[in-house]
Amino acid sequence: MDLILFSCKARLQSYFRQKRTQRILLLLLGIAMSVFYSWMFSYLLQKAHEGGINPSVEKVLGYTNLFILAITIMRSFFPAYIPKTEFIHRIYPIKPMQKFWVELVVELASPFYFVLVSFLLMLFILSPDYGVGHLLQSLMVFLTAHITRRSLQLLVERRIKWRQSAFITAAIMAGAFVALQVREPMYEPITSPLLLIVHLAALGFFTASSYFLEQAAFEPKQKVVSYSQNSRRSLAWRLFKNNKIAKQLILFGLAFKVLMLAADAGAYTTKGVHLYDQNISIWMFVGPLVLYTYVFNNVWGFYKTLWLTTERASGNIIDFLKASLMPLRVPLLLDAGLVVLYVAFFNKEHAVFILLMYFTSVLVLTPIGIIASFLSPKVVRGGVMSFGAKTSYLYTFISILLIGLLFLPLLHPLLYLVYPVVIGITIFAVVAVLKEYPKYKYQLFERLYKTEV
């Protein structure tokens, strides 16, 4: 217990050690947003109770739990990947079970989880339809999402001994948990206290599964560079193939996109309705936004040797533009291929909008990525654990905001006039930044190559 308390205290202190004022303001903003959303969900519960809206109270409670489940898992994978933090190094003489519990609890000592719990407590206070049982159920859903997230991170970051008894045990326990969830989903409101106990026991099995999965994960995935003597292989392909960190993030982002498109394709095939028609925000996953927020808003952070080579060779702005586009070529072709296949087989009715939106997104996000790479680069440290080097949060929000403007034609076709305006603004911005490059290059070099004390 002393180790847990000490680790939680150390993590909270480390969070507020740098940029203290900014992070306190962000925490206060998160609390304000939690109050707003709790009021909104309590209002929906009240309207459902009075019969003013179509979903019943049970449905609104289920949507609330699904909202908690989705946002807890997705926060580590979109708009940028957040690694599983290893608080206690494996060489320390600490029992595996103790290490597991310490890291599991300390991960909860996070401003995000504080904001999420405040949302649940405020919803419990504001809504009479949200009782003690529902609060406990939501907390279990949130813990389940947390364990799911860290298990997925283990599969992404670590090598797994697939034939080891620990992994087989983890798979059996996880399978039993999933089977129960298919029959009695945890996010749906409970009908009896006994069902709450059943879900609590299932959560215990799922936690044990995560523990055994961690025992089967034996080391981080290593970076391997392969050199090809084939002269037909383009430099763009080699930049994609040999930068293991960027490649893994790009492939993970593409897999995430395939999952979203497959969910919409499945809904269209079975029900004849697109998920994107019911939730406009899902349209963000149709465009190439994930590629930029994962990697290409920090292209010089991932490919700093390419930047330095271009700077030492010529320092010409045209060469920098060509160099910044080369790493993007292969991932963008893969991403565009997925979108074309999706449109051809599952969404021909929105083909004009999707293709125009995609093309415009490339024209908008590429200048934003170049600007972000010059003005706000992030240091990418060696090895797979450099997943922690994320792109700039500021430019991630700017990218999401600008892409959001490209959805306006869904309201009226006349709003396609927004497209040239947005493209013009981003091109003007990147030209202004490139003119000041002689001043920014020293800051860029200091950021990427200066050793931090």
Image: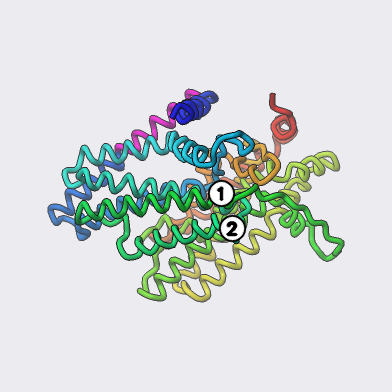
Q: Check residue 336 in the rendering and tell me which mark sits there, or answer none.
A: none
The answer to whether residue 191 is seen in the rendering is yes
Seen at 32% across and 59% down, the residue is 185
Quadrant where the N terminus is found in the figure = top left
Percent of width and height locating residue 291: 59, 53
User: Do the residues bearing badges 1 and 2 touch, measured as CB atoms within 8 Å?
Assistant: yes
Seen at 56% across and 54% down, the residue is 155
Sequence order check: which comes first, mark 1 or mark 2? 2
Q: Is residue 300 left or right of residue 168?
A: right
Residue with the mark numbered 1: 215
Q: Is residue 30 magenta?
A: yes
Percent of width and height locating residue 383: 69, 44
Instruction: Identify the residue at the far left of this view.
Output: 50
The answer to whether 453 is drawn above or below residue 219 in the figure is above
Please state which of residues 190 and 170 is positioned toward the viewer in this rendering. Answer: 170
Q: For residue 278, what is the image quadrant?
A: bottom left
Please state which of residues 42 and 335 is positioned toward the viewer in this rendering. Answer: 42
Q: Is residue 175 magenta?
A: no
Seen at 57% across and 55% down, the residue is 253
**Region rendered in magenta:** 20-35
What's the amino acid at mark 1? Gln
The answer to whether 212 is drawn above or below residue 126 in the figure is below
Percent of width and height locating residue 198: 29, 55
Q: State whether the magenta stretch is mostly helix, strand or loop.
A: helix
C-alpha span from label 1 to label 2? 9 Å
Q: Check residue 164 in the rendering and tell me which mark sits there, or answer none.
A: 2
What's the amino acid at mark 2? Gln
Q: Secondary structure at mark 1?
A: helix
Percent of width and height locating residue 387: 61, 44
Q: Is residue 406 left or right of residue 435?
A: left
